[in-house]
Image (cartoon, rainbow, N blue to C red):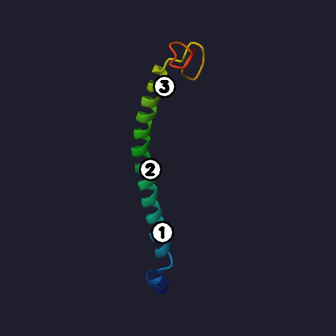
Amino acid sequence: MIRLFKNFRKDESGAVTVDWVVLTAAVVALAGAAYVAIEGGTSTLSTAIQNELNDISPDSDGAGGGGSSGGSGSGG
């Protein structure tokens, strides 16, 4: 029985696994923190863009711009 405990104490095969688990947990935590920081900024930006687009009034004739009133062309 004592030999079993000595062998268990010397065995380091699981130490590498524990290192990888801790490293992976740290990476996941950092990714979560980055997501929270980025999500807040993008939410604010998308709301500002939505408000700007809602404030734009389209032309009454549906044309993309210009129009024929008050032209500066060379008419004869």
Position of 10 with respect to 64 (left or right) is left
Where does label 3 land, which residue? Answer: 53
Q: What secondary structure is marked by label 1?
A: helix
- Crowd band around label 2 with a 10 angstrom C-alpha radius: few (<14), some (14–19), many (20+): few
Question: Do the residues bearing badges 2 and 1 touch, measured as CB atoms within 8 Å?
Answer: no
Q: Nearer the viewer, residue 10 or 29?
A: 29
Q: Quadrant of residue 60?
A: top right
Q: Nearer the viewer, residue 26 or 16?
A: 26
Where does label 2 land, which residue? Answer: 32
Q: Amino acid at mark 2?
A: Gly
Question: Do the residues bearing badges 2 and 3 touch, measured as CB atoms within 8 Å?
Answer: no
Q: Quadrant of the C terminus?
A: top right
Q: Quadrant of residue 74?
A: top right
Residue pictured at 46% horizontal, 75% vertical: 15
Which label lies toward us, 1 or 3?
3
Which label lies toward us, 2 or 3?
3
Who comes first in sequence, dot 1 or dot 3? 1
Residue pictured at 60% horizontal, 17% vertical: 62
Q: Amino acid at mark 1?
A: Trp
Q: Nearer the viewer, residue 36 or 1?
A: 36
Where does label 1 land, which residue? Answer: 20
- Crowd band around label 1 with a 10 angstrom C-alpha radius: few (<14), some (14–19), many (20+): few
Mark-to-mark CA distance, 2 and 3 = 31 Å
Position of 68 with respect to 19 (left or right) is right
Q: Nearer the viewer, residue 41 or 18?
A: 41
Task: Estimate the x, y position of residue 75 in percent, counting from the top left.
Answer: 57, 16
Position of 64 with respect to 30 (left or right) is right
Q: What secondary structure is marked by label 3?
A: helix
